[in-house]
Image: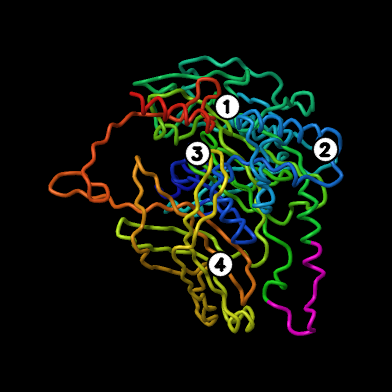
Amino acid sequence: LFQWYWKNIYVTLKKTWMAPRITHYQRLDMHVPLRLYATESSAREGACIPSLIATASQPCLQDDDDDNDNIKLKEQTAMETEKEDDGIILAEEADLAPNVWNINKMPWKFRLANTVEDGLRMVQNDHKPDDEPHTLLRYSSSSATGSTSFCNKTSKEEGQNTNDVNDQSSHSDDYVHKIKKQPDNNTNNDSCWKPMDIPSNWMLRGYDRPIYTNMKYPFPCNPPFVPTNNPTGVYKLEFCLPSRWVKEDDLANEEKDDDGGETSHYEKIGKAEYTILFHGVESAFFLYLNYQLIGFSKDSRLPAEFTLPGFLLPAEDNVLHVVVCRFSDGSYLEDQDHWWMAGIHRSVEILRRRPGMDILDYSVQADAEGHLEINIDLKALYDSDNVNVAFNGRKIVAKLYLDKQMHPKGGCLKGTEVWSDEATVPALDGSESNCCPKQTCKISGIVPNPMCWSAETPNLYTLTLTLYVGSKPFQAESCRVGFRSIEITSGMLMLNGKKITICGVNRHEHDPDEGKVVSIKRMRQDLKLLKCV
């Protein structure tokens, strides 16, 4: 009886954003920001441009036949970049990382709903009359042991039942600051959608309001439940993939082996894979593409990446919806002595992984003695994929350069190569019953007499990782690396063998004008202030 109750009553009625057992749905494994460079030279330059990590806007990747509105948008973006960079315009970042498309400056639209259910219905109702009914995410359990799955019900089946779902949060409608009701949430009217800049917090754009609490929550404390009246922002973006990407994908499908031989593994793959990366959304969100559920994620300070599946339209208009819940069960863990905000507060990017770009993640450890250890995760390839791959082999070439970053905004002064090594990545045995989707490659070495890193002498090197198939490079990644050792000796904290004293300050990610959207200029201002104290 208890198992039946757990499966059919308690779990099925719980809402996803208040379900502690669900932290995400269809979200990819977290990894370092990959820029998917085509050459090692581009990777070296890109490593010295911090904005390429999360804030680079790349308007030149727009379609060749842009209309006047898009041209104006490009000019406005360039003016804003020049203004923010104090007159310094960086190198052509889009040429360095042509497989990363930052969509911050695209014409995003926004509406605010009173509840999460209303926000999900906005997505359902925002379609043409002749379209088929769309899906609304519901949560259920596939077994009494608590293993979870997601179920979909059409808007016709769902009707108004969403409002009838009862949970323990029904009595928590009132929280510290009353929010004015938003009228006509379900109206399918383009005039209801208003422009919204990304990244931003909607509280500072005329919707809802920011909340500050110290010892108490901004709603009745009854974990994991949050109020039914939960302000929910619905973001909408209509976009087409860059024409350059579409043309290259079409060309890749038409290419044949010039020698008339056997088609390689990568030519068999065909088109590139596309993912969308949210660098930060508070507090939980649902993602829809062309009215189909893509995924769900919690955690306001970590990135969330999703695969864009087959119904992404390469040469047609696509519609993206992001339904952002202001409060979730994660709000109980993220409670801090700071302002409560919500929205897409960090950059959004669409990434294209071309065939052969198999590096999925990597990590680097370096100490003051010069020991360097690198772990690289790659897509697993098996002998059964193609004998040519096993014959030619894949290899990773790692190189360390003494490059210098010329300006806080970027600029690379290329230096000498101080270390290099490589490792082969053979194809796995395809007869294995438990095939793993990835394999790991390890490279280690010793850099003689490294220039160590400290706060007073922040010496950094540039590490590049290049993936080769045979003699052809397919992908390059890079990062800045510092050599340092931290240990406790005889009760003393030591950095690179020297005693240090740390003066700590509790700093939140906050801007007095932009909320949780913190610019590099504001970061520098904070650091200068801390150094003066």
Closest to the observer, 422 or 36:
422
Q: Is residue 163 visible?
A: no
Asked if the residues shown at circle 4 and circle 1 are in contact, with their CB atoms under 8 angstroms apart, the answer is no
Q: Is residue 516 visible?
A: yes
Q: Mark 2: which amino acid?
A: Lys
* Badge 2: residue crowd in 10 Å (few <14, some 14–19, many ≥20): few
Q: Nearer the viewer, mark 4 or mark 3?
A: 4
Residue with the mark numbered 3: 14
| Residue at 38% across, 68% down | 445
Residue with the mark numbered 2: 128
- Give the x, y percent position of residue 196: 68, 28
Q: Mark 1: which amino acid?
A: Asn
Residue with the mark numbered 1: 201
State the separation of the CA atoms marked 2 and 3.
Answer: 31 Å
Residue with the mark numbered 4: 379
Give me the disc on residue 44: none
Asked if the residues shown at circle 1 and circle 2 are in contact, with their CB atoms under 8 angstroms apart, the answer is no
**Residue 258: in magenta span:** yes
Which color scheme is applied? rainbow
Q: Main secondary structure of the magenta part?
A: loop
Closest to the observer, 499 or 490:
499
Asked if the residues shown at circle 2 and circle 4 are in contact, with their CB atoms under 8 angstroms apart, the answer is no
Q: Quadrant of residue 235?
A: top right
Q: Is residue 60 left or right of residue 518?
A: right
Q: Is residue 452 placed above or below 282 in the rendered structure? A: below
Where disc 2 sits, the SS reads loop
Q: Mark 4: which amino acid?
A: Lys
Q: Nearer the viewer, mark 1 or mark 3?
A: 1
State the separation of the CA atoms marked 2 and 4.
Answer: 40 Å
Where disc 1 sits, the SS reads loop
